[in-house]
Amino acid sequence: MKVTISVIKADIGGYPGHETVHPDVVKVVREYLAEAKKKGMLIDFFVGWCGDDINLIMTHAKGVDNKEIHKLAWDAFVAGTVVAKKLKLYGAGQDLLKDAFSGNVRGMGPGVAELEFEERGSEPVLVFMMDKTDPGAFNLPVYRMFADPFNTPGLVIDPAMAGGFSFEVFDTIEGRKITFKTPEEMYAMLAFVGSRSRYVIKRVFPGPNNKVSEKEAICCVSTDKLSQVAGTYVGKDDPVGIVRCQSGLPSVGEALEPFSFPHLVSGWMRGSHQGPLMPCSMEQAIPTRLDGPPRVVCLGFQLANGTLVGPVDIFKDVSYDYTRAKANKVAEYMRRHGPFEPHRLPEEDLEYTNLPKLQERFKSRFSKI
Ligand code: F6R
Ligand code: MG
Ligand code: MG
């Protein structure tokens, strides 16, 4: 059976400020999707959240980029926004950047990651949801899951993985894409995806001789850049990602292992700082220290003919306590830099800045050296 998993997310209002979602808003969104499930539009759904972002995890049989599914998500967010506005939540409706739905939520504010595939005999799926960061935050962990033998023992000892994996990489500045095959082109790919503010891993495909077809994407990350839609800073892009696991793909544990290292990502306060990515449960995903540090939540499901069995709130596990402690140490260390790089992002990556205005104001005071 062919099934599609669509994860569509938006920040439609936080409280207090940009910290977390309000239960009344989640309730309305959930009711909206339940109605759609009753009508047969969805096979199943789960409404998750991370920080101030609501994540609609939906399964259906309509394929990726489906107009009805995207409209459903848009309308659910619009319904949630009505409640958010009533409660005067902060930034109510902030990610709904257009007045009316125009066929696909892409380019309208919400972030989207979708996979369509033939459901296997057993289909474990992980959904990652991040807050206070951007799509480039997925580059390091996704690279490690699928290409780093020090992370993923299966690359060395599972014959089904011997053919490696292919990575589709988006150049978010020039709007072009390229596919790299690993392990052959690993060094070249790293030269690009190491620049995570520009090159982002969009999808991953199995290499030859895997049990899953080379044509079927097994990982997808939302790469939507709000600032490019709105033309100005309107919040970070707080990405989501979907990863299929096991039987020739990274096991659940291999897909989670990269998150045991709280790597530095862009985002945090005003989307303008580097900070450690802290794995945590949905309950713990309330970024308060200087609106951070950035968070990642992972929900694990088994699919049963499209039904979402789960979720397991993965990073609840005490084995991430060490990572969280380390993330807090790194957060403390980075904070001591105040407005200095590398805590503050370099000028070209600043999404929220009055630097151009200051440059204009002080222009006449500069003289040649
Ligand atoms: C970062 C984020 C927050 C806000 C900050 C200022 O993604 O959402 O750190 O940037 O709270 O918010 P405004 O400008 O809305 O007062
Ligand atoms: Mg917000
Ligand atoms: Mg957010």
Image (cartoon, grey):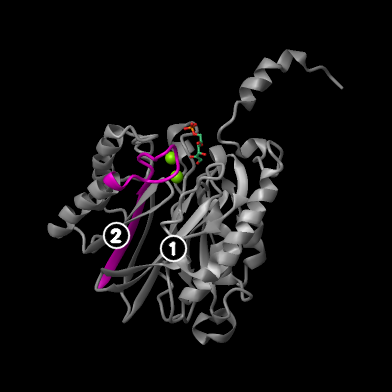
Residue 37 visible in this rendered orientation of the protein: yes
Residue 181 visible in this rendered orientation of the protein: no
Assess whether residue 263 is covered by the magenta stretch: no
Instruction: Using the image, determine if residue 295 lies above or below residue 90.
Output: below
Q: Residue furthest right?
A: 369
Residue lying at 46% horizontally and 74% vertically, measured from the top left: 252
For badge 1, the amino acid type reads Cys
Q: Secondary structure at mark 1?
A: strand
For badge 2, the amino acid type reads Phe
Q: Which residue is mark 2?
A: 46
In the visual, does 24 lie left or right of 55?
left
Percent coordinates x, y for residue 117 in the rendering: 33, 69
Q: Which residue is mark 1?
A: 298
Q: Residue furthest top?
A: 364
Percent coordinates x, y for residue 46 in the rendering: 29, 59
Percent coordinates x, y for residue 206 in the rendering: 47, 73
Q: Which quadrant of the figure has residue 34?
A: bottom left
Judging depth in this view, the residue of 79 and 147 nearest the camera is 79
Q: Which quadrant of the figure has residue 263?
A: bottom right
Instruction: Using the image, determine if residue 66 lies above or below residue 310.
Output: above
Judging depth in this view, the residue of 312 and 303 nearest the camera is 312
Q: Quadrant location of the N terminus?
A: bottom left
In the visual, does 166 lie left or right of 110?
right
Q: Which quadrant of the figure has residue 366?
A: top right
